Image: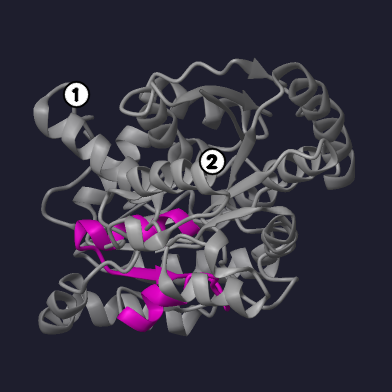
Amino acid sequence: MRRLLIVFGTRPEAIKLSPLVLFLRGQASKEFVVRTCVTAQHRGLLDQVLATFDVTPDHDLDVMMPGQTLGEVSSRMLAALEKVMRAEQPDLVIVQGDTTTTLCGALAAFYQRIPVAHVEAGLRTWDLEQPFPEEMNRVVTGRLARLHFPPTAQSAANLRNEGVRAEDILITGNTGIDALFYILRQLESGRLARPEWPFLDPGRKLLLITGHRRESFGDGFLRICDALGQLAKRADVQIVYPVHPNPNVRGPVNERLGALPNVHLIEPLDYVPFVDLMSRAEILLTDSGGVQEEAPSLGKPVLVMREKTERPEAVEAGTTRLVGTDVTRIAGEVSLLLDDEKEYRRRAALHNPYGDGHACERIAEGLRSFFAHGKMMPEAVPAAG
């Protein structure tokens, strides 16, 4: 049996890797020994997701300290991960996405001469400043990885253009869609209780907001808040904004929106209530990559409050639209969707380019092929979504 070490540390990574952990420990348990290591880059938010999926880490590094710089947290992660990898001696290390944990997990494995598999590989904005530092993290992780699991054909093409061999690439769809469908099944079956939202008005359309990106700190968040303030004046709208704890986000959001009666600023949500709110929302405004992928599966139009996105497939498909942090663009695009029922229905009905909920199965097939043949064999794996 092959030993796998899955490394993650943030809420988005936990959402997207927990279904893979469950699949490999369940349907593939006769082939793989799966060990997990969390850095706890997002302590509280990470723990919420782990509890939802009933995943208990085998190693919890708990590296975060108040006020750490990226350099400080990276050096602590690398040192701690080196000890874990020496103890576990895995045949393969799996990382996901574009976080500091992702980069450090890949680099620590590379230093130990352990092959790396990168889930959600190949995403690019082609601008190392946007998003910062995530674009650099995924580019460098792509150079360190042996196996690449891009979610779409476009992300696979990015990898091939950078010189990655075709036999090291397998298009899988995004594991975030696997996670979303898992939670929806749990809610629909009653195994998970649907949250109650006493402050919601069933007569108003719900705008659900998420925003936390570093490149919007300062004037960007002030403009976002001003746009939301304009929209809050509409009698048919209510806004729910789970506010990230970073003071660069919480400060301007509380200052500009805290006193508005139909704006509900709430604490960051567990994954299950967030999925429930997404299912109730009319429109989602976000700078989150995960929301860009998930919401189209729920038939929800997404407005992306960034100037560039590493997920252009959704923009090209029409399920998302870039609005940046410009007040007029944000307010105008939301108003269009609220006022033009035909346009809303058209965008809500578009196909989600990010997957069909079977990414974990394809990843497992890719791993089997790699360990059996030294390469992946895409022709033997059902095509993604």
| Foreground pick, 100 / 329 | 100
If the image is split into quadrants, where does the C terminus sit?
Answer: bottom left
- Going by the numbered disc 1, the residue's amino acid type is Ala
Q: Is residue 175 left or right of residue 60?
A: left
Image point (57%, 60%), residue name? 168
Q: What residue occupies the far front of the structure in this picture?
A: 373
Q: Nearer the viewer, residue 121 or 148?
A: 148
**Residue 316 point in image, percent of width and height:** 37, 83
Q: What amino acid is found at the position of numbered circle 2 in the picture?
A: Phe
Colour treatment of the image: one colour
**Residue 139, image x and y in percent?**
70, 64
- For the question of whether residue 384 can be seen, the reply is yes
16 vs 127, left or right, is left
- Measured Cα–Cα span from mark 1 to mark 2: 41 Å
In this rendering, the answer to whether 152 lies above or below 362 is below
**Magenta region includes residue 310:** yes
57 horizontally vs 290: left or right: right
Q: Is residue 145 above or below residue 224?
A: above
Q: Which residues are magenta?
A: 288-317
As drawn, the label of residue 371 is 2
Q: Residues within 10 Å of mark 1 (few under 14, many from 20)?
A: few
Q: What's the residue at 27%, 66% (across, down)?
A: 352
The residue at which mark 1 appears reads as 193
Determine the residue positioned at 24% across, 58% down.
Answer: 297
**Looking at the image, is mark 1 or mark 2 nearer the viewer?**
2
Q: What SS does tag 2 mark?
A: helix
